[in-house]
Image: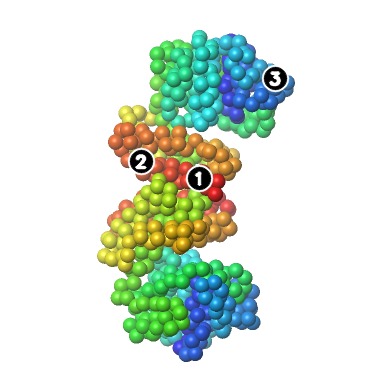
Amino acid sequence: VRTCVVGAGAIGSLYAAHLARVGDSFVLTRRAEHAEALNREGLRVSGRHEFSAHVRAATRPEQLPEPDLVIVATKTTALEPAAAALAGHWPDALVMTTQNGLGADEVVRRHGDWRLILAVTFMSGTKHSDTHVEYVLDTATWLGPSGDTPFERAQEVAALVEASGLKAEALPDLRPAQWSKLIFNATVNGVAALTGLPHDWHFAAENGVSDLGHLVHDLVDEGKRVAAAAGVQLRNDPWEMNVLATRRGSAHFPSMLEDVEAHRPTEVDLINGALVREAERHGVDAPLHLALLRLVKAREASYST
Amino acid sequence: VRICVVGVGAVGSLFAANLARLDDVEVWGYDLARDHVDAINRDGLRLSGAGEVVGRVRATSDPAELPPCDFGIVATKAMHTAAAIRATAAAFAGGSVATVQNGLGNEESIAEHVERVIRGTTFPAGKVVAPGQVQWDVKGDTTFGPFEPQPAPREAIGALADACTRAGMPAQVVEDARGAQWRKVIFNAATNPVGALTGLTHGQVVEDPALRRVVSGLVDEGKAVAAAQGIVLDADPEELIDHAARPDVAYGHRASMLQDVEARRATEVDYLNGGLVRFGGEHGVPTPLNAAIWALVKGLERSWE
């Protein structure tokens, strides 16, 4: 089997290295020197798994043979140009999106009529260099069919990811899982970006009146009301996901916090923004997520002042 | 007349140095910063900027040195009110004590230790630039009135306001000083934490239409809490917010809470947004946005621990 990961950040690197153990693993990168380094040195995984993988990397799809499966693992903010670069290529490939937020499959569909798989992933890693990624959290990738893709294809992809050593589960309808993660992400990322706190015990503390857990709970409840208005039954309770994650011991630094500290644009428009737009579309209020969205956008604006 | 300023920071210094110019007033200052106290006793308390003043003030860090005083003016940060008044209360056994501090709850703290209390609100601002030296940034008015449960005599309030006014710190006496106080609290609670969370100046916060709506959301909750207690604001806080954003007023002002956050000092958020949430709770007025902002700033403070 041939797979191609588009975007070799931490998540993309973890998929590419593991999939090299069960087939030919290709990688499309934005930077030429990144592709050259991967071709020269391969990809090293440390942490929960320790191995080195041989991958074939390039910056343009025409430089690679057609894969059976494409995994688009760019940040949500980079999805549009990544999908545009695939236009006109690899018509028979199955394309899987893994971005945060909602509607990644719709973005890709605008650039070609591939069969699509929608995924959300809870695994996490830390990229130490272009050719070295640390596997931190070995939580699953959930995936399901988008549009008229048969469920069997999602099951095949899940089996392939599992065979590579990562965790995956195929679901006939991804929306309940996707929304659970969206509400979790909007809450945890937004609060972390504004407070500077990693996702630690503060997020579950509800003893004192000014404890952060009250706000986290309110944000989750607001998200649940939006989900209910959108007719989505959540797969997991985002509050329980939050509590569980804070008990894992090592505090996770959400990407939005890392972005704010590095003065990079964040995904807030695509995460909290997605929730706020869904609220508007379904006629419910989401004042707290709207406030987080506005505050994080303003924080981004402060970089240049 | 003997007046002791409790907490000789920026605002306390403006009162102390100006009042010391009057022949009929003896001014004492109580402050825990030894180098500041020593410099004041050696060289006088020096103001520069909006006015050039050298005040002969007798400063001390030892409450036992304070003689009996006719008036106290408490000007500490709100989180230090209880400790400061507990230490100095004996000097005010026969006098009246006014607060010119930010936030809600200072009068209640003071009243636990002294009989006669004056509710006060002041708008002048400055900053301590070196021991004994204070930059006077903005002139402004002060409003005094009785603290309703334990009021100072009307004549005493009048005498204090008269002394301040003659000293160049214009002060007026009103029947209900809550209107001025709550206007300033609502202004501070709506703008300071937004500056602190985003890193933007007052003017930048106000000119961003999305952020301005967050500010107005906070103002609206504050107004509702004031109205539920029968407090008539002396002016609309929104006017003050827009006025302060003018380039010739305070466009480039970095809120004191932003300065606190950048210096990793505890903020006054418990007495601003926290105070509004507490009073809202007592009067059945929901304050979800102020609660959210309070939790975010507390989270920010906890991220330094």
Distance of label 3 from label 2 (alpha carbons):
47 Å
Viewer-side label of 1, 2: 1
Identify the mark at residue A39; answer none if there is no mark: 3
Chain letter belonging to callout 2: A
Q: Earlier in the sequence, mark 1 or mark 2?
A: 2
Q: Nearer the viewer, residue A135 or A279?
A: A279
Residue A253 to residue B247: above or below: above
Q: Earlier in the sequence, mark 3 or mark 2?
A: 3
- Classify 10 Å Cα crowding around label 2: few (below 14), some (14-19), many (20 and above): many
Q: How is the image coloured?
A: rainbow
What kind of residue is marked 3? Asn
Chain letter belonging to callout 1: A
Secondary structure at badge 2 equals: loop
Secondary structure at badge 1 equals: helix
What kind of residue is marked 1? Ala
Viewer-side label of 1, 3: 1
Distance of label 1 from label 3 (alpha carbons):
38 Å
- How far across and down, in percent of the image, does residue B255 sit? 49, 59
- Classify 10 Å Cα crowding around label 1: few (below 14), some (14-19), many (20 and above): some
Chain letter belonging to callout 3: A
- How far across and down, in percent of the image, does residue A169 sit? 49, 21
Q: Residue at image x 55%, y 79%?
A: B53
- Classify 10 Å Cα crowding around label 3: few (below 14), some (14-19), many (20 and above): some
> Would you say B64 lies left or right of A180 here?
right
Residue bearing the label numbered 2? A286
* Discs 1 and 3 carry the same chain letter: yes
Q: How many marks?
A: 3
Identify the mark at residue A301; answer none if there is no mark: 1
- How far across and down, in percent of the image, does residue B135 sit? 56, 70
Q: What quarter of the picture does the N terminus of chain A occupy? A: top right
Viewer-side label of 3, 2: 3
